[in-house]
Image: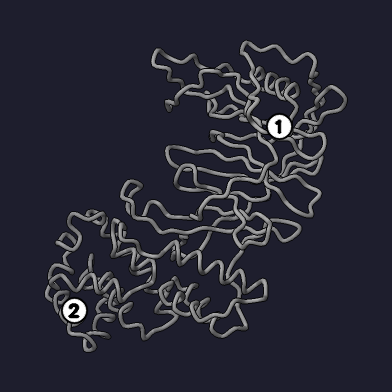
Amino acid sequence: MWKRISVILLGSVIISGCATPRVDAPETRTDVPEVGDATPVPATVEVNLPTPISTTSAVASPTRFVVPTSTPSNVDAGDATAIAATMIAQMPPTTTPDASGLSSSLQGETALLGLRDRYVAAITLGMMENFDDPHPLTIYEKVGTEFTVVATYAFADEYISTLESIPVATSDKAFFAVSGGVGAHSSFAKIFSFDGTTLKVEVETGSDAGGGALKIVDVNDDGQVDLIGDSTDYYVFCYACGVRIQGETIYAWNGTAFVEQTLQDSSDATLQRAIVYARAQRYADAAKQLSQVKPPTALVDQWNVVLIERMITLRQPLREDPYPFLAAIFFGDYEAAVKLMRGYDADELVNPTGRFFANTPADGFVDAVVWNVVGFTTLALEQDADLTSARFLRGWANTLLDPRNPAGIADLQAVADQDSFYAAVRDAVVAR
């Protein structure tokens, strides 16, 4: 059972208001990595339960409830106390913290969010003592001095950290996000809508890294917040290795729903070339094309530019990258990747335990290097078969673990007469 630092005041109430949500800085991988692979989940849960709660006589609870006066809120303090007392009283008992103050659960805080005119969303924070116990999100309706449960959604195996309002224009629904964690590193976020009757999951995102599954930010400066899901691959080698394939998935409000934004063909020839490069993960080339594009007026092209610019920023190699060679590959800058190799003897480059890999994050993970180099360069070569640097890199990678790999030998033979360095690597492979 995981150990978590216990909350000293177990009965505290966290109240979420309707203020503008935080704005964070921006933050894909399939069989061949590509931009964005998160998928909305159309889960709907609606439960009508006639269980009134009186705001004048809250359900008895063994814990003490305090409503913070410094937190802006759209929930009345008395209502908040009544709902929080009821929810926590219905939960399984929390393990008493040990002498060091540690407990396996944080079953004591309740987050509340006012929805529309008379509804309140409520959820307990932390994790369940028993993972098999449901962790309910509950929608209450206030009629007179009583609250009635009108809808619930049961979380399981997750721990809950935030309940956050999402301001949406021109909608008769209220939108909000529930975020938290799963396991040691992973995090999740579910975006719900509620129309007075139905509680629905509109978008679901997940991240391999804790705390980063969702960002709420106006991506294209149109006055309406967008949703950014983290689709970064944090496990290229291992979680602690620090080598990552950065990615994100953006959902924009279209007047009815949050819709994933993807690259669309453009009638602007220059922008279209940038789009083609981006689809093949060739962001170095996409950046050169994008610098020649005039500010677009069509909404679809505005989004094309935003998506490409953000991915260029995410994949741009940095001085502090733990493994610059793969950083260049992920950016699609194959000439830069080859340049990093030219400082080594050919015999070292074709040795999977040689100096090119030793004492780097790739040490012991050469198979992952092969997988990524072959995957990314194949995307580029399917678009441009004459991209010599990409063909050399693919040939080299395919022969690292199997020097007799026929496809790898064919790639190296195809470029050997164009560069003496390529020829030397080819000869070193043949000599193994």
Image coordinates of residue 170 in percent, x first then y, are 79, 55
Is disc 2 placed on a helix, strand or loop?
Answer: helix
In this view, the mark in front (1 or 2): 1
Is 56 drawn above or below residue 74 in the view shown? above
Image coordinates of residue 186 in percent, x first then y, are 47, 43
39 or 432, which is in the foreground? 39
At 36% across and 86% down in the image, what residue appears?
Answer: 386
| Residue type for callout 2 | Arg
Number of other residues with Cα within 10 Å of mark 1, as a class: few under 14, some 14 to 19, many 20 or more: many
Residue where numbered disc 1 is placed: 138
Mark number displayed over residue 404: none
Is 158 drawn above or below residue 4 in the view shown? below
Q: Is residue 274 visible?
A: yes
Quadrant occupied by the C terminus: bottom left
At 44% across and 78% down in the image, what residue appears?
Answer: 288
| Residue type for callout 1 | Thr
* Image quarter of residue 331: bottom left
* Image quarter of residue 141: top right
